[in-house]
Structures are given as structure tokens and as C-alpha cells.
Amino acid sequence: MPTGAGLRMLCANPASVGVLMYQEREVRSGPFHRALSEAVEHRGLSLSRIRAHLAARGVSVAESTLSYWQRGLRHPSTPRSLDVVRALEAVLGLPPDSLIVLIGPQRRSAGDDRRPSVAELRRSWAETCSLLDELSTAPGAEGNAKLDVVTVVDVLTLTGEGRISEITSTMVVRAREPGADGFVVTHQDEPGTDMEATTVFATDGCRRGRVRRSATSPGMVFELLFDRGLAEGETHTFAFTLRLTASVRSTCFHRTVRSRMSAYLLRMRFDGCALPARCVKTVREREELAPVVSEPLHPGPGATVSAYFEELDVGIAGIDLIWE
């Protein structure tokens, strides 16, 4: 009897034995991204489910960030990201600090803080981006270098033909250094759109400055002026509207993210009689790459679909539209 009871005890939870063996293997191996990837695979959860488990523990992280970490494209380094990793250990059933110890000290190179240009992230915008030099006192200088974009809300209105008729953007920026007194916007539309018929309106916290339109691509750049220099660390909220009277059917709307952004909300308002067959929330590292996040969206009451992004890293985020 004691032997039988002992055997029953030993075999009462065979899964836990496997977990312990797995944990020991992961503690001793690296690098971080491989250990994380194998832990995710062993747990059998999608990144969206892992993100939900983390949220239930009061920890917020973007699905794209988890994907970057898992693929070795980004590395947790800030105090906040280390808190996320500790919560990940619990969600994935790993011992405390088993992933943390694999991170190790991170060496920052001189180029770590350099923001990629819009053209680097979206090569099809190269002709439009060349207009930026016309608005710069130092051609070739990085646009908006004195500002961090903190939060953006984009609201789009589409017609019964699937054309974007209006874009209203509300932005919160923070000054990286003293003296920031405006923001330069780069806008690219669908091929075939007549940019001469697109009008810019400054609606709040700014006034419209110079506008330049591309003669060879459906793009434009324009200034929004604050009329005062911001102090270092100061935040500023402003809004503007684009009205497009000669656009074509839209296949997507994406925002280019050149440095980490706290939150981004994109809302599309459709004609109730002309809904797309599918709407997909996407995040890409660059224009030509496959999405690291791809989630179906479903229009709610009012024929509106929304995509909300948290802690976005450098890349391209938005909604793809499939009409038929």
C-alpha cells in the first residue's frame, strides 16, 4: 500500500513533471528571444492570449512588442519592460527571473536613438518625402527632431464608394528639447488621387503653414505651427483635418511610427450600405514586410471600425481593407 500510494503521488500530475523539466532546460539556455519563443510554443497560447493574461495581471504591452522580442528584433531594456518580462514568466509557467537572467546588460550604440526616416519605413513614399527639404531650413535634416509623438487619434470618414472623404487627426506631442514650435506632416494617398483637390485645415492648437504637393506621386507635406516654442518636456495637443474631394477607393490607412508611441487609436466610419468584406488591424516593421500583427476587425453600430494600439514601436500601424 505505501508503495502504491507513493506511485499515485508521483504520477498524480505528470504534466507538472514535464513543466519542471522544461523550466530547467530554459533556465540554462539562451539567448533571450529563443528561450521566450520556446516558452510561448510550449505554453500553447497565441500572443493575443498571452497579452490578455498579462492585462489581467495589470501589465500592458503591445502584441507587436511581444512579437519583436520573440523574434529577436527588439530587446527589453527599460525598467517597465523588465516588469513585463517578470509577468511573462508567471504567465508562461516559468520560475521567477528565468527569463530576466537571459537579458543581460545591453550596450547602446551611437545610432540607437536615431529615428528612421519615413522613406526608410515606406519606400514608395520617397518622392513625397523629397518635399520635406522644401520646408526645412537645413535640407536633409531630420523632420520633427525636437518632438516625440505621444498619442494620436485618427478619425476617417469614407463614402459609399469606399473613398476617404475626410481625415481628422488629434495629436499629443512632447518636446525633446526647448524651442519646438511646429510639426511637419507627410501624407500619402492611393495612386490616382488628385492631391490638388485635397485641402488642409488647422482645427485646434495650431495654424496651417506652408503646403507642398508632389507632382509625381499622390503625396503632400505641410506645416502646422504652434506660434510659440515649447519648453523641454512640455506636451502640446493639436488637431487638423484633411478633406479629399478627388480620392479613389481606399485599400488601407496606415500611420508611420518613427519612435515609440504610447497609444494610437484609428477609427474608420463607413457608409452603412458599403462595408468592406474584411477589415484587418496590422502592424509592420516596414512597408514591404509581412505584418507582425494581423487581427480581424468587425464594424460595430454606426458602421464604424476601430483599431487601438498600445506602446507602439517603430514601424507602420493601421487597418487594411478588403472590399471583395
Image (tube, helix red, strand yellow):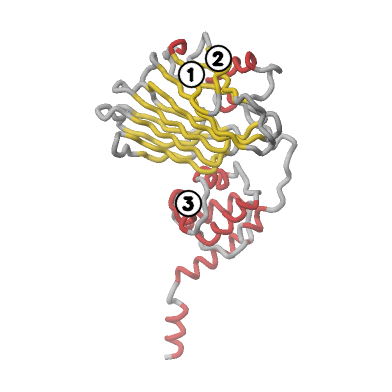
Query: What is the secondary structure assignment of the residue under circle 1?
Result: strand
For the residues labelled 1 and 2, say whether their Cβ atoms are less than 8 Å apart: yes
Quadrant of residue 245 within the rendered picture:
top left
How much space separates mark 1 and mark 2, taking CA atoms? Answer: 8 Å
What's the distance in space between the residues labelled 2 and 3, CA to CA?
A: 41 Å
Rendering coords of residue 284 (x, y %): 51, 34
Residue lying farthest to the top in this orientation: 215
When the figure is inspected, residue 194 is found, relative to residue 324, above or below; the finding is above
On the image, which quarter does residue 277 sit in? top left
Residue occupied by mark 1: 200
Q: Secondary structure at mark 2?
A: strand
Instruction: Please state which of the two labelled residues, at mark 2 or mark 3, is closer to the viewer.
Output: 2
Residue under the image location 52 percent in, 45 percent down: 67
How far across and down, in percent of the image, does residue 35 sit? 58, 54
Image vertical order of residue 314 relative to residue 157, above or below: below
Residue 37 at x, y percent in the picture: 54, 51
Q: Residues within 10 Å of mark 3 (few under 14, many from 20)?
A: many
Tag 2 residue: 211
Q: Residues within 10 Å of mark 1 (few under 14, many from 20)?
A: some
Earlier residue among tags 1 and 2:
1
Viewer-proximal residue, 161 or 301?
A: 301
Instruction: Identify the mark nearer the N-term, 2 or 3.
Output: 3
Q: Which residue is mark 3?
A: 51
Amino acid type of the residue tagged 2 in the rendering: Val
Q: Which label's residue is closer to the chain start, 3 or 1?
A: 3
> Which quadrant is the C terminus positioned in?
top left
Distance between mark 3 and mark 1 Cα atoms:
38 Å
Pointer 3 with pointer 1, Cβ within 8 A: no
- Label 1 is placed on what type of residue? Val
